[in-house]
Image (cartoon, rainbow, N blue to C red):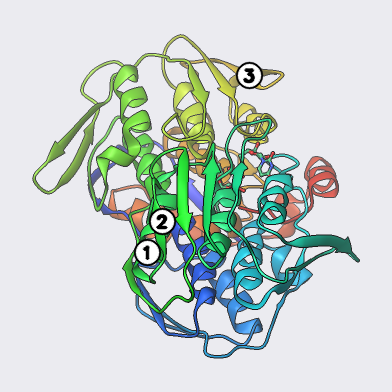
Amino acid sequence: MDKLVIEGGRRLTGTVEISGSKNSCLPILAASLLTSERSVIKGVPRLADISTMSKILRNLGVRVDQRDDTLSILPGDYQGRTAPYELVSAMRASVCVLGPLLARFGRARVSFPGGCVIGPRPIDLHLKGLRALGAEIKIEGGYLIAETKGLKGCTVYLGGHFGSSVLATANIMMAATLAKGKTIIENAACEPELVDLAKFLNAMGAAITGYNTHRIEIEGVESLKGAEHNLIPDRIEAGTYIVAAAITRGDILLKNVIPEQITAIIDKLSEVGVSIKQEKDGLRVKVDRKLSSVDVTTLPYPGFPTDMQAQMMALMCTVGGISVITEKVYPERFIHISELNRMGADIILEGATAIIKGSKDLSGAPVMASDLRASAALILAGLVAQGRTEVNRVYHLDRGYERLEDKLAGLGAKVWREKSRRTTIDTTEYREKERVYGSSYQA
Ligand code: EPU
């Protein structure tokens, strides 16, 4: 099992190219199941999660070919209806194939996704929406068995305890494209990844409007065709590099970013004192004054993204003052706190709120985290910690950050990949975490 090793203390400078969005790509790959024709997706990052979704498609009998950053998907008349446990348990986003399979064939069998380290992650909103469209769904042997004699348009309210749901909105939007009549999703999520999905579906022949609002209307059509699509850049990867520049008090240029999609991140980092400016070639991020603490509350888009909470916390450990970070999307997404504290941070947790006493000198340590964004936070902390930090279980990072160590090294960080020796990481504490949370993080 690989680990990343960082010798901290280097200021990052230079240019970094942001990859295509993982969270756009995953539902878009599922959407390609809605037709028998070929679709071509460009700007696809090489990530473990994309490989998992490709495997799910291939397992259904779909042809998926990758050349450089382009994926070609040819469903043909694939016969599969099942997304098996082995694949769904590796990645929660696999549940996205439920809507397309049901819409196209009236039948689907998808493993019920489990909880994961960032919280319980129910799927009640997915089921509510699909049932409202006319699906009968039962749970048998750990599988969701869904059937319909024909989906019918309806009005459905998709708000849960924590607001809207990104992938539930995606699932219902995809299913509704082939339903009879009009579907209205009230309290829909409007993350940029959903806008990207809606644009792809419309290019396939769907009739979706209002997709950048909380009320999406979908007029069902008879059939869809294949389409070509360029993915939007990954806004969370962009945010992570912005924090990398901030935490090392560096000066970097980000290429392939859509600033309008990261307004909340830019706004918060500007409040911290980071200079972020759009230039001709990209987004320039630099630190030329003292940074200060801020309070952050995560919210659905356009609020501050939960997927940037851990990285922001790492930054707050290094600036003067006290910051309060409140998690309103995943109230349990704080597994990184104990690892940051092992590096010398001073963070306490009160319910869904973390209180960070900043200005601590972090010191390198062997650490591990059980999810993607927590791992990113530990890498960021490692960039400024004194000495050597080893971030174990690097496969979490490989799920969501394309060539992370190459990109960081290109900016001047001293970071490299090594094979882990289990003895350095196999602590009782970790074994306990793994027993409780399971070994696989699920995006
Ligand atoms: N929720 C429900 N019921 C549901 C679905 C969700 O109560 O049926 C709750 C969740 O438990 C959570 C909140 O609603 O409290 C929002 O969850 P959401 O459904 O929006 O999350 P998701 O669609 O499963 C996507 C991203 C996550 C990201 C969240 C929130 C993908 C593949 N995953 O998950 O990304 O954190 O939206 O923005 O798009 C990551 O990339 O690291 C990652 C975890």
Q: Earlier in the sequence, mark 2 or mark 1?
A: 1
Residue placed at 37% from the left, 64% from the top?
202
Looking at this view, name the residue that lies furthest to the left: 280
Alpha-carbon distance for marks 1 and 3?
Answer: 40 Å
Label 2: how many Cα within 10 Å (few below 14, some 14–19, many 20+) = many
Which sits in the foreground, 386 or 134? 134
Which sits in the foreground, 181 or 89? 181
Q: Secondary structure at mark 1?
A: helix
User: Can residue 401 be seen by looking at this rendering?
Assistant: no
Q: Secondary structure at mark 2?
A: strand
Q: Secondary structure at mark 3?
A: strand
The amino acid pointed to by label 1 is Asn
Residue placed at 69% from the left, 74% from the top?
106
Q: Earlier in the sequence, mark 3 or mark 2?
A: 2
The amino acid pointed to by label 2 is Ile
Alpha-carbon distance for marks 2 and 1?
Answer: 6 Å
Residue 284 x %, y %: 19, 38
Where in the image, quadrant-wise, is ligand 1 located?
Answer: top right
Q: Are circles 2 and 1 on residues that touch, CB within 8 Å? A: yes
Q: Quadrant of residue 122?
A: top right
Q: Is residue 265 above or below residue 440?
A: above
Instruction: Write down the residue under mark 3.
Output: 353
Instruction: Write down the residue under mark 1.
Output: 202
Q: Earlier in the sequence, mark 1 or mark 3?
A: 1
User: Can residue 132 be seen by looking at this rendering?
Assistant: yes
Within 8 Å: ligand 1 and the Cβ of disc 2?
no
Residue 72 x %, y %: 41, 82
Alpha-carbon distance for marks 3 and 2?
Answer: 38 Å
Instruction: Write down the residue under mark 2.
Output: 208
Q: Is residue 38 above or below residue 316?
A: below
